[in-house]
């Protein structure tokens, strides 16, 4: 049987990749994809623990995250489209009108 | 009856309020009548108060003013023989000048404002003479200074008038500073500022010649030199002639400038305790009398001659105070109020007739144009020159005799006094001849317009003329068969001071006659001198001028005292203030405030730096923050 730490390691690597993607990418769509990656890394960790504790309660959280991720993707993509229509770009560095 | 003395100053105050607040709605006639009537009411009340006064002083406290622990001051009035004489003189002369003003200022746009100021002045002046404590006197003192400032600068459209007002105010502040310090010393020492308490306690508290009492007297006298235009603070008075002429007559000749003499006489007990202070007063008085008289001899502006003459006559009064002849000083104050007010009003009548021409070189021959002015002016000229029998003769001779005979006096004071008397006769007759005799030196066109002034102006002239004639008779000297009742009248007020002073030896009547004859003779010389130079058309003045141009320029330019003050006092103060402005104010004060603002701005900019609007920056901060919190949690939990 594959030990828990392997699953958690994969989950952490995926989460780290997602975080780095959010931080270094300038493309809004890439950022959204990176956020999906982070969410799924969290899902993987939850499922792993569920198996480890033999407690299916964590599945509930995973389903909620699926729903939220789907909603987030819908809202996020529509925002991206709205921004693109307005500014003709999806580069986040161009979206700096909140500069203090 | 005597409890109504507080009404004496209140009447002009009412006049001031009505004229000041509703002056625009009153007609000229209404303003003038109101102004005159309120002062007339004060005059009648003062006369009644004098009649009902009887023997002793009477005190009446209207209300408490300041109560702070041991320090209490009230709106209290003191009526004794001295303040009664002052109140009657002030309100009487003021009334006549108010009446005169209705004619003189008839064409002025701000007629009611003028009467409001004039009434306010009379109010403060009466408070000054009737106050029963130093602080209320000081209030009146400052109030008349304010009115003087307002009225000198009444025609403030002229720069010279506005500047003269400022000069008068600022020079007076120097004197008032000394006066205020004197009052503080008095309170510190006596614990009271009420005249009767202070003067009763003074002889027990000090031995004659005490340093502290000398300091108090000299500080009070500094205040008097400012208000009464004595050396070294006399410079404001000649400039004050920029004001309307009735103002010069009322404030700068008859009443306000004599406040210093009144104050010194009021504090006679304190001065009697300090021979040093009395000597200073006498020396300053004598020096001012002579010094101002020399300057009066070469002035060409009719009002400036009279201004220097006023300074000189005030010097006489202080000379009298300095030799402890306080009643002689007050007597001369009163007669001077009559004839000097008359001289100013006469000069005003001339100026009025010539449409604001004040230069003596453009007058002459006015005798036939202005008969009433000519006659009354003549009486006043004779009076001030000391013509035997007239008011000025009696009072001036009393001063000269005191300066010789008093144990505090001396021959030197008498000589200075007599020289001044000669100069007085000279410059007054010079003025008189230049203005009223000879050929007219104004244009034909002006000559057709010259007219005698209206009744409202000549009336007061005539009344003052009569007073200048007979006003001295109440103090007719014993040596000439009189009773000198004026001195007897004031004796109770100065009795306390008399006791502290050394008694003089009795001089022979022949000495008094001799000195009187000498002073009259010297005044006559002055008259003859002026007669030969200015009436006979002598070229001597021109020759003398050409022979000693430096001396003439020196005197003509008033000994360059104004320039000297400007150089030694005004310039350094202005320079120092400029330095403080440029370096202390702009660098230190502004610098610290601006520096604080700049520091806060820098801080804000530093704080705004992370808010750069870059989403990734925020995300990175958020991620790092999460890591930090997690690290901390792990650290704490493990």
Image (cartoon, rainbow, N blue to C red):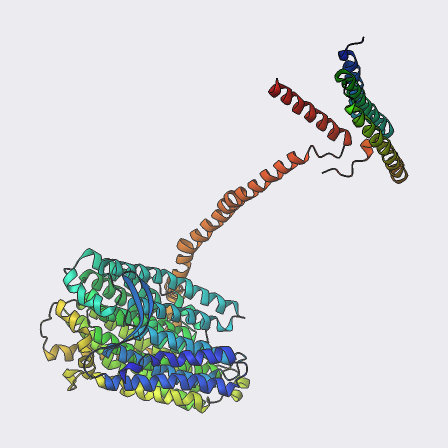
- Residue B455 visible in this rendered orientation of the protein: yes
- Where is the C terminus of chain B found, in terms of image quarters? top right
Left or right of B18? Residue B507 is: left
Name the quadrant containing residue B330.
bottom left
**Front residue (pair A70, A86):** A70
Left or right of B136? Residue B600 is: right
Residue at 67% of width from left, 23% of height from top?
B630
Residue at 43% of width from left, 56% of height from top?
B570
Instruction: Using the image, determine if residue B513 lies above or below residue B315.
Output: below
Residue at 68% of width from left, 26% of height from top?
B625
Q: Which percent across, then down, holds residue B163? A: 48, 65
Residue at 51% of width from left, 80% of height from top?
B22
Residue at the outermost top position: A1
Q: Which percent across, then down, holds residue B108? A: 52, 80
- Where is the N terminus of chain B found, in terms of image quarters? bottom left
Name the quadrant containing residue B470.
bottom left
Name the quadrant containing residue B457.
bottom left
Q: Which percent across, then down, holds residue B479? A: 14, 83
**Front residue (pair B82, B389):** B82
Left or right of B440? Residue B261 is: left
């Amino acid at each position: 049987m594959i030990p828990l730490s392997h699953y958690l390691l994969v989950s952490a690597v995926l989460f780290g990749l997602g975080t780095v993607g959010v931080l270094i990418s300038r493309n809004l769509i890439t950022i959204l994809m990176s956020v999906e990656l982070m969410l799924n890394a969290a899902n993987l960790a939850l499922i792993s623990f569920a198996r480890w504790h033999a407690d299916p309660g964590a599945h509930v959280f995973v389903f909620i995250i699926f729903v939220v991720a789907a909603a987030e993707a819908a809202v996020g993509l529509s925002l991206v489209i709205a921004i693109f229509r307005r500014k003709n770009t999806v580069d986040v560095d161009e979206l700096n009108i909140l500069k203090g | 009856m005597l409890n109504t003395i507080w009404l004496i100053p209140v009447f002009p105050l009412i006049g001031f309020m009505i004229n000041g607040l509703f002056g625009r709605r009153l007609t000229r006639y209404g303003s003038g009548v109101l102004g005159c009537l309120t002062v007339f009411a004060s005059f009648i009340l003062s006369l009644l108060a004098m009649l009902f006064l009887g023997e002793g002083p009477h005190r009446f406290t209207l209300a408490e003013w300041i109560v702070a622990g041991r320090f209490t001051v009230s709106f209290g009035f003191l009526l004794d023989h001295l303040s009664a004489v002052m109140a009657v003189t002030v309100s009487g002369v003021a009334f006549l000048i108010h009446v005169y003003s209705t004619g003189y200022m008839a064409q002025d746009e701000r007629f009611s404002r003028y009467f409001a100021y004039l009434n306010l002045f009379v109010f403060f002046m009466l408070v000054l003479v009737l106050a029963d404590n130093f602080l209320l006197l000081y209030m009146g003192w400052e109030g008349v200074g304010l009115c003087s400032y307002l009225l000198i600068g009444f025609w403030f459209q002229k720069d010279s008038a506005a500047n003269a007002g400022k000069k008068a105010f600022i020079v007076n502040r120097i004197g008032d500073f000394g006066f205020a310090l004197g009052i503080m010393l008095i309170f510190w020492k006596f614990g009271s500022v009420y005249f009767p308490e202070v003067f009763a306690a003074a002889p027990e508290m000090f031995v004659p010649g005490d340093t502290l009492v000398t300091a108090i007297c000299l500080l009070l006298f500094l205040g008097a030199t400012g208000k009464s235009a004595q050396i070294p603070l006399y410079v404001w008075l000649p400039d004050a002639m920029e004001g309307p002429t009735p103002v010069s007559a009322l404030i700068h000749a008859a009443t306000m400038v004599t406040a210093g003499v009144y104050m010194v006489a009021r504090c006679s007990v304190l001065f009697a305790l300090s021979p040093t202070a009395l000597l200073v007063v006498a020396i300053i008085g004598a020096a001012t009398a002579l010094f101002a008289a020399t300057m009066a001899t070469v002035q060409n502006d009719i009002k400036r001659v009279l201004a220097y003459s006023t300074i000189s006559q005030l010097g006489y009064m202080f000379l009298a105070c300095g030799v402890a002849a306080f009643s002689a000083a007050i007597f001369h104050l009163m007669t001077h109020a009559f004839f000097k007010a008359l001289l100013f009003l006469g000069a005003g009548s001339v100026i009025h007739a010539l449409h604001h021409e004040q230069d003596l070189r453009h007058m002459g021959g006015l005798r036939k144009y202005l008969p009433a002015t000519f006659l009354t002016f003549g009486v006043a000229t004779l009076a001030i020159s000391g013509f035997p029998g007239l008011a000025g003769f009696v009072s001036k001779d009393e001063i000269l005799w005191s300066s010789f005979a008093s144990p505090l006096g001396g021959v030197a004071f008498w000589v200075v006094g007599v020289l001044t008397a000669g100069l007085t006769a000279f410059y007054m007759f010079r003025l008189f001849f230049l203005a009223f005799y000879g050929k007219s030196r104004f244009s034909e066109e002006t000559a057709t317009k010259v007219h005698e002034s209206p009744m409202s102006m000549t009336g007061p002239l005539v009344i003052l003329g009569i007073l200048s004639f007979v006003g001295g008779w109440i103090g007719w000297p014993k040596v000439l068969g009189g009773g000198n009742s004026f001195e007897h009248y004031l004796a109770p007020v100065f009795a306390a001071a008399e006791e502290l002073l050394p008694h003089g030896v009795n001089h022979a009547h022949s000495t008094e006659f001799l000195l009187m004859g000498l002073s009259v003779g010297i005044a006559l010389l002055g008259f003859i001198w002026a007669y030969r130079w200015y009436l006979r058309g002598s070229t001597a003045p021109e020759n003398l001028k050409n022979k000693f141009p430096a001396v003439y320029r020196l005197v003509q330019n008033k000994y360059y005292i104004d320039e000297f003050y400007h150089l030694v006092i005004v310039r350094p103060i202005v320079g120092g203030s400029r330095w403080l402005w440029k370096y202390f104010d702009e660098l230190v004060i502004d610098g610290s405030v601006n520096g604080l603002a700049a520091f806060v701005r820098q801080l804000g900019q530093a704080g705004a730096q992370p808010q750069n609007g870059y989403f990734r920056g925020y995300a990175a901060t958020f991620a790092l923050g999460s890591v930090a919190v997690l690290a901390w949690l792990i650290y704490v939990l493990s």
